[in-house]
Amino acid sequence: MNISEITKQSGKVKVNGWVHDFRDIGALKFIQLRDSTGVIQVTVLRDSADPKIIEEIKGLPKESVLEIEGMVQENAKVQSGMEIIPETLHVMVRSKPELPISVSEKGVTTGLAKRLDYRCLDLRKLKTQAIFKVQSAILEGMQRYLLNDGFIQVFTPCIMGVASESGSEVFPIIYFDKEAFLRQDPQLHRQLTIAGGFPKIFDIGPAWRAEQSHTVKHLCEHRVCAVETAFIKDEYDIIRLEEQVIIAALNNVKDKCQKELDTLGVKMTVPKAPFPVITFPELYEILEKKGKELPEDTDLDADADRILWEHVKEKYNSEFYFVNWFPSKIKPFYVMKRDEDPRWARSIDLNYKGMELSSGGQREHRHEKIMQAVKEKGMKESEVHWFTQFFEFGVPPHGGFAIGIERITQKLLDIENIRECVLFPRDTERLVP
Amino acid sequence: MNISEITKQSGKVKVNGWVHDFRDIGALKFIQLRDSTGVIQVTVLRDSADPKIIEEIKGLPKESVLEIEGMVQENAKVQSGMEIIPETLHVMVRSKPELPISVSEKGVTTGLAKRLDYRCLDLRKLKTQAIFKVQSAILEGMQRYLLNDGFIQVFTPCIMGVASESGSEVFPIIYFDKEAFLRQDPQLHRQLTIAGGFPKIFDIGPAWRAEQSHTVKHLCEHRVCAVETAFIKDEYDIIRLEEQVIIAALNNVKDKCQKELDTLGVKMTVPKAPFPVITFPELYEILEKKGKELPEDTDLDADADRILWEHVKEKYNSEFYFVNWFPSKIKPFYVMKRDEDPRWARSIDLNYKGMELSSGGQREHRHEKIMQAVKEKGMKESEVHWFTQFFEFGVPPHGGFAIGIERITQKLLDIENIRECVLFPRDTERLVP
C-alpha cells in the first residue's frame, strides 16, 4: 500500500518506506515514514509496544528502509490527522547514520552540484519524485494521442555514419575501426522513414549536443518526442498536430497528477487550440515597436525572445506560441522554402513561456530542390548523398517536429534549472553518477 | 483514407499512395496503387477518362506518388474484388524510372545487404510495413500494462562516465576532453533510480554492444524495454511481472494487428502464465539425459539452448520459458546470490522459441554483500564506487529485466535475420543509411 492511499478508515495497513525522520523522547518514539507518495507518522509507545520493535528501532538512522504492519488511528496533533501504531516493524536495510546530503526539504541549502553528486538521495525528495511522475504523464499523454491518431512508434538510429546536419557540436564515437557520431536530432532518419512509406511515425529517444553551454536550459543528452507525418498540405498541418500533442500531454498531467502539482505548488492551465502563430515579417514589426532591431537573416536572440513572449502574453494571454517563416538562410538544407517567397522557410518553432520547446516544419521532398539547397549551403553532395539519394524515388510531402521532454517538464513546472528534470543529467562537466 | 479501409460500398474516395505497378495496354491502363496498408487497382479507360489523367500518367514510373479521387466499383477480375475509377489523378512526385531494388514482393531475390543499402525502398514493402506495425503494438502493449500497474516511464543516461559492467565490448565516445562510453544496458542506472526512491520504473531506449558478431541475432545498436521494481520478495516476483508484460504485449498484437499477421503469414498464440521455470541444477539433468555435458560455471551454449528448447516444447508445449539459478561465477557483481547456496544466483533469462529474449533477476541491495562480490570478481573498488556508494544509504530489495524489442519482434514473426526488425540497422559493417 502506498502512503498516500492510507486514510483514517484504513484499519490495518502494511507499508514499506524510508525513515524520513526519527525522534526518540523516551516514552514516545516518532518515525516519519516516507515513500514516493508521501510521509506518515509511525508512533511507538514504549510501554505498550512489542519489545522487539523497541529493540529494532534503537538508534535508527534516517533513510533506513522499513516494513511496518499496524493500525491507522486518528491523531489531531499530526499534519495528516492520522498515525500508524505498529504491530510489527522490520528494519529491512539500515542506512549509514551520516548522510552526505539531507533528504529533508526543510531549509535545504545544498547547492545543485553537490545534490547531483549524491543524486540518489536527492531523488528521494517528494518534490523530485513529483517531477518525474509529471514527466511520465506528459509522455503517456503524447503517446496515447499519437497512437490513437494512427501513428506508430519507431526507433531510428542513434549512431550516424556521417556527422548530421551542421557537423559541429557532435560527439564522435570510435566505432570499431570507423568514425561515427551520436545524432543531434533523429530528424534525417525520420524523413527516411517517411521515404520508406510509413505515413505517420513517432520516435521517443535521446539526442546529444556537444555544446559548451553552461546554462540552465542546455543538456548534452536530452530526450525528444519526435513526430513525422506524410501527405501534409503545408506546415500548418504540422502546427495543428503539434498543438494537439501538447494539449493531450497537459490534459493527462491535469487528470493524473493533481497531487504532484500540489506538492510542487504549481497551478497549470491546459492551453486551447489554435495557438498563436507569429511569422518573421510580423515579428520584425513587433520588435521594432519595442525599439529592438533584429538583423536580417539572423535567429532570434534572448532579447527578442523576451519581447516576443511579453507581446504574446499581453495580446493572446497564451503560454504557447509558434514562430513561422524563419529566414531560409539560417535553416538547414532539408527545410522547405515558401513557394511564394523562398527567402522564408516553412520552418516553425514552438515556444512555451518564452522558451523554445521544439523545432519543426515542412521538409523539402523534391529531389531537385534538395540538391539546389545543398549547393546553396555550400555542402558537398557526396556527404549528403546517403540521405538525398532516396528522394529520387517518390517521397511524398511531409513534415514534423521534436518536442524536448526535459524542457516541457521544466516550463510546465516552472523549474529554474533543466538538470532537475533529468534523473542523472549529462553536461559539459558531469558524467557520473 | 487508407487503402485497407476501402470497401465496395465506399463510393467516392480520396487516396494517396505509391505506384506499385503500372500497365498500359492502350485502351486500358491499370495502376496498382499502394500505401502502407494495402494495394488497390486504379483503372483508367482511355475513351472515357479525363484527357488530363491520360496525359498525367504517360510513362508513369513505379514508386511515383499519386493523389487520386474516384469511385469505387466492383470488379470480379481483381483480387480485392474492386477497383477505383479516377475522376482526378495528380502525380504528386514522379519517381526516377530505374529503381535500384524492386519494391515488389514477387520473386524478390535481392540479397539483404543490398536491400539494406536501399532501405527506404525496401521498407515500402507491405511485409516490412507490417513488421514495424507489430513492433509498435508490442511496445504499446508493454507500456500500457506497466503504466496501469503503477510504473512510471523514465530515461536513464546513455552516456556512461565509466565503462559499464564488463568493460569490454563498449563503444568509446570522445566527450569533450574526457573519455566516456555508450551504455551496454541501462541496468546500473535503473538500480540507482530505485536507490533514488522510485518504486516502479521502466525505461525504453537504446543499448549498444561493440561485439564482433556477424550473426542473425546480434545488433550493435538495439532497444530494450527495461523494467525495475522495488520491495520484491525474491526473483519470482520479477518472473511473474515479466510474464504479464509479455502477455500484454502479445495480446495487443493479437487485438490490433490481425491484418499484419495475415500479411506476414504468421499464426501467433498468446502464452498463458505461469511460464515454465527451469533451474540450472534441473537443466544439468535434462542435458545429461540427452548426452550433453555442460561444464560447471559456464553459460549455456547453442547446443544446450537447442536441447532445452526441445525439452520445453515437448514437456510444457510452451514457447516461453525462464532459466533461473545461473551460476554466480558467470554473473556480474550486482546480481544477488541465493542465501541457501550462494553458488547459484537469483538471475533469470527469459527464452522465446529457443532464443534469449531478456536477462534479469534480483539485484543485491546490501552494501556489504555488493562489496564482497566486487572483491570476488577481482574488480577495483574505486571503479565501481560511483555506483556502490549509494547502497550505504538504505536501498530496498529490488530487481528487474530488459526485453530486447527487436528480438521479441523477430521471434514472434519468425523472421530469420534480426536486421529485418530494425528500420536502419547498425552492425559491425553498417553505419548508413
Image: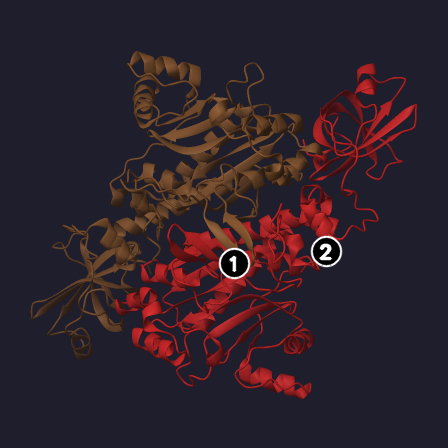
Chain colours: A brown, B red
Subunit ID for the residue under disc 1: B
Circle 1 crowding by C-alpha within 10 Å: few under 14, some 14–19, many from 20:
many
Q: Residue at x 34, y 28 (%)?
A: A319
Q: Residue at x 72, y 48 (%)?
A: B115
Badge 2 marks a residue whose secondary structure is loop
Q: Residue at x 10, y 74 (%)?
A: A47
Task: Find residue A138 and report its horizontal and vertical position in percent.
Answer: 41, 42
Q: Is residue B36 visible?
A: yes
In the rendered structure, the answer to whether residue B355 lies left or right of residue B34 reads: left
User: Could you confirm whether marks 1 and 2 are on the same chain?
Assistant: yes
Q: Is residue A56 above or below residue B358?
A: below
Q: Residue at x 33, y 37 (%)?
A: A412
In primary-sequence order, the first of circles 1 and 2 is 1
Badge 1 marks a residue whose secondary structure is strand
In the rendered structure, the answer to whether residue A30 lies left or right of residue A179 reads: left
Indicate the quadrant where residue B350 lies.
Answer: bottom right
> Which residue occupies the foreground of this view, A103 or B189?
B189
Task: Find residue B352 and report its horizontal and vertical position in percent.
Answer: 62, 66
Subunit ID for the residue under disc 2: B
Cα separation, mark 1 vs mark 2, equals: 30 Å
Give, as a three-letter code, the residue at label 2.
Answer: Val
Q: Which residue is mark 1?
A: B208
Q: Which residue is mark 2?
A: B266
Quarter that holds the N terminus of chain B: top right
Give, as a three-letter code, the residue at label 1.
Answer: Trp
Circle 2 crowding by C-alpha within 10 Å: few under 14, some 14–19, many from 20:
few
- Name the disc covering residue A295, or none: none
